[in-house]
Structure formats: C-alpha cells, structure tokens
Image (tube, grey):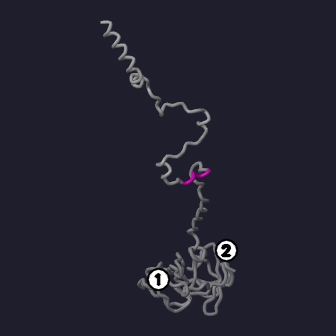
C-alpha cells in the first residue's frame, strides 16, 4: 500500500506541468488592460475600415428651421367698377357715333355676329363697358352692342326725347323761345349747367332742360 501511495505521488508530480497548463487561465486579449498612454493614441485602422470610402465632411453649420419666406407680393388694387378697364374714364358715359354706319356686335370682336347697325352720324351713345379696342354701347332705346372704339367720338351730342321740345334764349322757361324740335332730333351739345343744356341744331342755338334731352346726365356740367 505504501508503494502504491508513493507511485501516485510520483505520478502527480510528473503531471504537474501539464495540469498547471490546463487549470491556469490564459489572458483574454479582449479583456486586457490598456495602458493609460495607449488610450490617447489613435487605433490603427483595420483592413475593412481602410478599404471603406471616405465620407463627405459634415457642414460646419446647419440651418435652424425652415428658410425665411420671400417677400410677399403687394395685394392687387381692386378695379373701380365705375371706371373703364381700358381708358379709366367714367362708366357709364356718353359719346357720339363718328360715322354714318356702325356695326354693333354681340361680343367684343370681329368674330361675333352683328346684331344692330347704327346709321345716324353724330347720334349719342352710352358706353357701359370696355374690352380692349371695343366699347359696349346703347342708344336712347336701350339697343346696342359692342362697337370698335374707332367708330365713336368724344364730341358730345344729345337727342330730343319729348314729342316737341322748346328751346329758349336763356336757361329759363320765362325767357323767349328760340325754336322747337321733335322727338329723335339730334343736336350738338355745347354747354350744360344747373340742369340746363345749350345745343345747336341746324345753326340754331337754344337752351332746354336736361329732362328734354337724352345723352347727358342731370347733374353734368359742360363748359
């Protein structure tokens, strides 16, 4: 028995180096403590990182929020409905027919059909709308359409709208009568004030109340 014990001890003594290699743990490279001087040193790039393409540098500054809005356009001034869109003259207003023939069309353009033909040169017309070179007009009976602006004139005229109108020497019904004119007679308008207008018909001149005439407003002043 003593011999067996000695033999076992001898075996254990001979197996010492091999047993120490098995039970003593080897240091783990991933857990090794890095010296303080090594922490500050940059790590060498690995093969994978060295092969990766370089990224674009980040901008030094980035905008904080959306870009500033552009300057707002000024609000359009609404057009005055009492003035023409082309001439900026008052609407409605009165003009006269420049020629002895004027085609009144259904719309502002030559492609629109002719509804009426005015045939009395100098007759008064009322302009109610404008569009380009065209004017929408109507006569004393409310008949009309769109005519080219070249067919009308700023020369003023009126039409007698009474069965028989009396024209006086002065703007006063107590003054002497100068002449009379029937309904539909066209007169050249020369002067208006205080509800009276002075006209010329075939060389004769006289005053008549505005109520006896068509082609002028009641409060219009012409001198």
Task: Please tell me which residue is depicted at 59% across the width and 62% down the height of the picture.
Answer: 75
Left or right position of 218 against 141: right
Task: Please tell me which residue is depicted at 42% across the width and 83% down the height of the picture.
Answer: 112
Image quadrant where residue 87 sits: bottom right
Q: Which mark is residue 194?
A: 2
Left or right position of 84 against 171: left
Q: Magenta segment, principal secondary structure?
A: loop
Q: Element under label 2? A: loop
The reply to whether the magenta stretch includes residue 59 is yes
Judge by depth and name the residue closer to the eye, 48 or 66: 48
Q: Residues within 10 Å of mark 2 (few under 14, many from 20)?
A: few
Q: Which mark is residue 109?
A: 1
Magenta part of the chain: 56-60
Q: Quadrant of the N terminus?
A: top left
Image quadrant where residue 84 sits: bottom right
* Residue 173 spot, x, y in % from top left: 65, 78
Task: Please tell me which residue is depicted at 61% across the width and 93% down the height of the picture.
Answer: 202
């Amino acid at each position: 028995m003593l011999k067996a014990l000695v033999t076992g001890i001898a075996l254990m003594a001979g197996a010492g180096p091999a047993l120490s290699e098995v039970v003593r743990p080897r240091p783990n490279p991933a857990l090794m403590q890095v010296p303080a001087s090594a922490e500050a040193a940059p790590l060498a790039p690995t093969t994978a990182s060295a092969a990766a393409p370089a990224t674009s540098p980040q901008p030094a500054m980035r905008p904080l929020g959306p870009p500033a809005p552009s300057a707002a356009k000024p609000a359009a001034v609404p057009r005055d409905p009492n003035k023409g869109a082309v001439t900026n003259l008052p609407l409605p207003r009165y003009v006269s027919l420049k020629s002895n023939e004027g085609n009144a069309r259904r719309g502002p353009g030559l492609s629109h059909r002719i509804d009426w033909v005015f045939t009395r040169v100098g007759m008064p017309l009322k302009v109610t709308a404008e569009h380009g070179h065209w004017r929408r007009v109507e006569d004393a009976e409310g008949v009309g359409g769109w005519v080219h602006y070249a067919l009308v004139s700023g020369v003023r005229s009126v039409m007698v709208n009474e069965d028989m109108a009396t024209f006086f020497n002065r703007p006063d019904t107590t003054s002497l009568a100068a002449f009379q004119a029937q309904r539909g007679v066209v007169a050249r308008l020369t002067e208006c004030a205080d509800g009276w207008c002075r006209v010329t018909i075939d060389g004769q001149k006289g005053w008549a109340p505005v109520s006896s005439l068509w082609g002028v407003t009641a409060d219009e002043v012409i001198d």
